[in-house]
Image (cartoon, grey):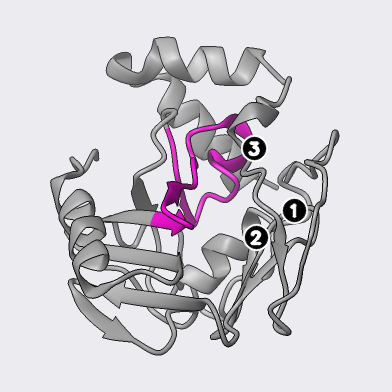
Amino acid sequence: MKNPLLELIYEKINRSHNRTCWNSNIRHHNYDLSKFLTTQHIGENGKTSPENVPTTPKQNTGSNIPDVPSGSVLRDAHEHASTLVKIFGDKFDFSSIQFQLMSPWIHFEGSNGNTIHRHSKGITLGYLFDTMYLGFSQNCFVLHDKRKFCTNDNYELKFYINGEKVPDIRDYEIFDNNRILISYGSETPEEIDEQLAELESQELFD
């Protein structure tokens, strides 16, 4: 049986404009943990406790990809959206290898951490984050090591689609040129506008 993940990897390798960076991604297996956030755990009760960055984060090998929606067909769509995740004003970086090409259905690729690629209809942002072992609900964003950034009396987890605030994005299906902002903290309206402007300035890559 053909492995859709491997097929997509081979397809990307054969694209000349991506060959150099893609081969580099395939060859290297060491995680760059310096790109993980080192902020403290912020629980729903508002209390903080220092936690260390994990030394061995999980990697999706392709055999444990979450189940896709029934009836989904690989490559029956090709949509691109730009995303920005800010936690206490710091950008979460998806360009590291542990977040790249974790599923053939929807992913980041080519060492770019801004552009989401969706290759099938009906695949949501929730599925994307599941493949990267990053969980989020309406109120919490959860990292590999189970640190949680949850809405509480002091901080709020906020979602914006194309500049409009929405209550949740797990079930959202991206389309071309969508702009997705996830922001956690106690930002002022002016600071949110700055984050939205940064998101808008990000270039989309196909």
Q: Could you tell me which residue is drawn at 37 percent across and 52 percent down?
A: 116
Q: Mark 3 points at which residue?
A: 98
The disc, 3 or 1, on the residue closer to the chain's N-terminal end is 3
The majority secondary structure of the magenta stretch comes to loop
* Amino acid type at image mark 1: His
Say whether marks 2 and 1 touch (CB < 8 Å). yes
How crowded pointer 3 is (Cα within 10 Å; few <14, some 14-19, many 20+) is rated as: many
Q: Position of residue 150 (x, y in %)?
A: 62, 77
Asked whether 53 or 190 is in front, the reply is: 190
The mark found on residue 134 in the picture is 2
How crowded pointer 1 is (Cα within 10 Å; few <14, some 14-19, many 20+) is rated as: some
Q: Kindly state the secondary structure of the residue where label 2 is placed.
A: loop
Q: How many marks?
A: 3
Segment tinted magenta in the rendering: 85-109
> Is residue 118 in sight in this rendering?
no
> Compared to 168, does 48 lie above or below?
above
